[in-house]
């Protein structure tokens, strides 16, 4: 199984500041046949189910604010919140879907 | 509006069985793969199963293989998870989720609210 490792486990960011979350996979999730990274990001607020933010490592889901962006390729990926809002307090997870079973990172808790 | 509503969770003794259901609405259910993901108390997300739109492809996590069975009824817009030989480490909130792909597990673009399964004597 591909192991997904997120860092940090938690971070506190001031309102309006940038938040950066890293995700590293134990093997490449870049598929050579289509040059796509099989990597997604989710946001999980307390009492709510996870919400898809980013897929194919950098494609923003419809309706997701453009302050959220995904980058990276191969084994190293980053989720960036460019200007943190109070509504962004949540736990963020990365997930690879390159191989079965799909696996999630351990999560990063973002606080103000 | 896409909606997924799980039901069937509850308290069950170790070794017991439970069947979870997920009622889908707001989209053409038969066009999408579907999956189950769980989150144990204090733990992260764990993908546990996927079924393709035609049920031709079914996948399981090793942790549930041989004990859990995923199925779907496209006529009823419903997804199911039959859970047998339940253990304490199966205690979790179970989420039904729509897969963005129809044949193999990919990312999950809609999630239900979840149903709690507690395995305890």
Image: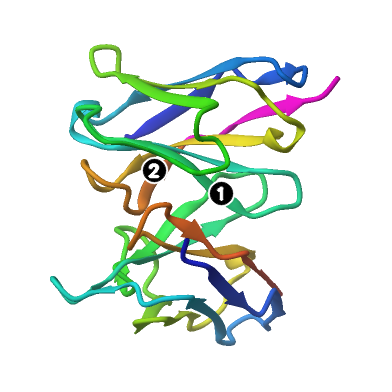
Question: Left or right: where does residue B84 sit relative to residue A65?
Answer: right
User: What residue is rendered at 13% in x and 71% in y?
Assistant: A33
**Range of magenta residues:** B112-121
Q: Is residue A12 above or below residue B57?
A: below
Which label belongs to residue B110? 2
Which label belongs to residue B81? none
Horizontal and vertical percent position of residue B93: 64, 36
Horizontal and vertical percent position of residue A106: 62, 64
Disc 1/disc 2 C-alpha distance (Å): 16 Å
* Identity of the residue furthest to the left in this view: A33
* Identity of the residue furthest to the top in this view: B76
Colour scheme in use: rainbow
Q: Is residue A87 magenta?
A: no
Q: Quarter of the image for the C terminus of chain A: give it.
A: bottom right
Horizontal and vertical percent position of residue B20: 53, 20
Q: In this view, does A10 lie above or below B13?
A: below
The reply to whether callout 1 and callout 2 are in contact (CB within 8 Å) is: no
Which of the chains bears the disc numbered 1?
B
User: What residue is rendered at 32% in x and 48% in y?
Assistant: B105
Label 1 neighbour load within 10 Å: few <14, some 14-19, many 20+: many
Horizontal and vertical percent position of residue B6: 51, 25
Which of the chains bears the disc numbered 2?
B
Query: Mark 1 or mark 2: which is in front?
Result: 1
Label 2 neighbour load within 10 Å: few <14, some 14-19, many 20+: some
Q: Is mark 2 on a helix, strand or loop?
A: strand
Q: What element carries label 1?
A: strand
Q: Does the magenta stretch include residue B117?
A: yes
Name the residue tied to disc 1: B46
User: What residue is rendered at 71% in x and 34% in y?
Assistant: B91
């Amino acid at each position: 199984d591909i192991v997904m490792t997120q860092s940090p486990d938690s971070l506190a960011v001031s309102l309006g500041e940038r938040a950066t979350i890293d995700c590293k996979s134990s093997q490449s999730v870049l598929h050579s046949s289509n040059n796509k990274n099989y990597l997604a990001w989710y946001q999980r607020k307390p009492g709510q189910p996870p919400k898809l933010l980013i897929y194919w490592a950098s494609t923003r889901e419809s309706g997701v604010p453009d302050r959220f962006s995904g980058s990276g390729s191969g084994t190293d990926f980053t989720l960036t919140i460019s200007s943190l809002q109070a509504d962004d307090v949540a736990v963020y997870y990365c997930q690879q879907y390159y191989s079965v079973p799909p696996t999630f990172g351990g999560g990063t808790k973002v606080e103000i | 509006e896409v909606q997924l509503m799980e039901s069937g969770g509850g308290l069950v003794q170790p070794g017991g069985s439970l069947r979870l259901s997920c009622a889908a609405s707001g989209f053409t259910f038969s066009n999408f793969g579907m999956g189950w993901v769980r989150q144990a108390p204090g733990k992260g997300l764990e993908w546990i199963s996927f079924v393709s739109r035609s049920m031709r492809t079914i996948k399981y996590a090793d942790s549930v293989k041989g004990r859990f069975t995923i199925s779907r009824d496209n006529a009823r817009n419903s997804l199911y998870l039959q859970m047998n030989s339940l253990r304490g480490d199966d205690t979790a909130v179970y989420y039904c989720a729509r897969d963005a792909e129809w044949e193999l597990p990919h990312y999950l673009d809609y999630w239900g609210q979840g149903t709690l399964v507690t395995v305890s004597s």
